[in-house]
Amino acid sequence: MSGGGLKFRADGTFTIVQFTDMHFGGGGEMEQDGKTAALVERVIATERPDLVVLTGDMIWSAGVTDPASSFRRAIAPVTASGVPWAAVFGNHDAEQGVTREELLAIQLENSGCLTQSGPADVSGTGNYALTVGSKDSGSDAAVFYFLDSGAESPEPVGGYEWLHTDQVYWYTSQSRRLNAGKAAPLPALAFFHIPLPEYETVWRLGKAVGIKSEDVCCPKINSGMFAAMVETGDVMGVFVGHDHDNDYCGTLHGVKLCYGRVTGYNCYGGLRRGARVVRMHEGRRSFVTWLRLDNGEAVQFT
């Protein structure tokens, strides 16, 4: 559960860069993937984050001769930066020719990687939490939850997989353990790939800011993860990817639901490529976020 030495800076800030849907591999991979790698390098150099988070679909695995090689290329600019990083899987990472466990082993070859396999008896690979220490005492001052949102749902349900009830229970159990005896829950963020059904709700209610240029490709089954977050009261923000033409953020029942900005050039989508940046301040139950685009522009979200 350790954050691998993550700590708020002396000025009280902690900055995260979220890259999503890099989609290394597949057709025309070298030219497009080279552009993606250069973008990742530029954003990290500009933002100087304390943590990089990859929210899935790092690669295309279906129809690729060597998905493990594609994955190593995908994470190379992140590992080269020396910034601590963590990842969750998307629906395309282990679609064919490689398993989540094999891709996790590749991640763990790098000392700066904080990804964990998570409990073997919980659905998915990569359900884990990382804590961030206080700048002064080093005691836990924030927590990040990472969840494996899966891939495809079985027939006859169809569509995308949902976060399973054992994952909901795992999250609430971790939250209770981390916040036991505290006057207020630790400020928390959650990261996974496939959006919750509530992403559609927050847009429909007119409570979101940003771009929605495609349907919310969420699961058909709502397993209650959002309700658990509202009831538990620690998660301030959720960050996903998956839908390349959406980048909005909206607040629903006190939780900000945010898309990242598609990062990879080797995939569909009409949005300018980029990354989402999130900045927390120790002791505050709030955060600020913006997009850093491939032309250097920063797009602020409030």
Image (cartoon, rainbow, N blue to C red):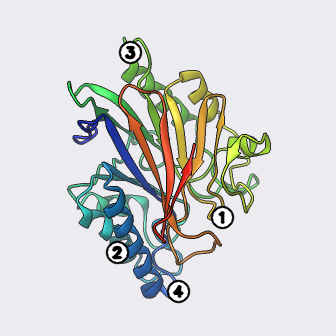
Q: What's the distance in space between the residues labelled 1 and 3, CA to CA? A: 40 Å
Q: Which residue is mark 1?
A: 245
Marks 2, 1: nearer the viewer = 1
Do the residues bearing badges 1 and 4 touch, measured as CB atoms within 8 Å?
no
Mark found first going from the N terminus, 1 or 3: 3
Nearer-the-camera pick, 44 or 36: 44
Q: What's the distance in space between the residues labelled 3 and 4, CA to CA? A: 50 Å
Q: Position of residue 143 (x, y in %)?
A: 38, 33
The amino acid type, in three-letter code, at marker 4 is Gly
Q: Quadrant of the N terminus?
A: top left
Disc sitting over residue 27 in the figure? 4
The amino acid type, in three-letter code, at marker 3 is Ala
**Picture quadrant where residue 68 is located:** bottom left
Q: Dot 4: what SS?
A: loop
Marks 1, 4: nearer the viewer = 1
Q: Which residue is mark 2?
A: 73
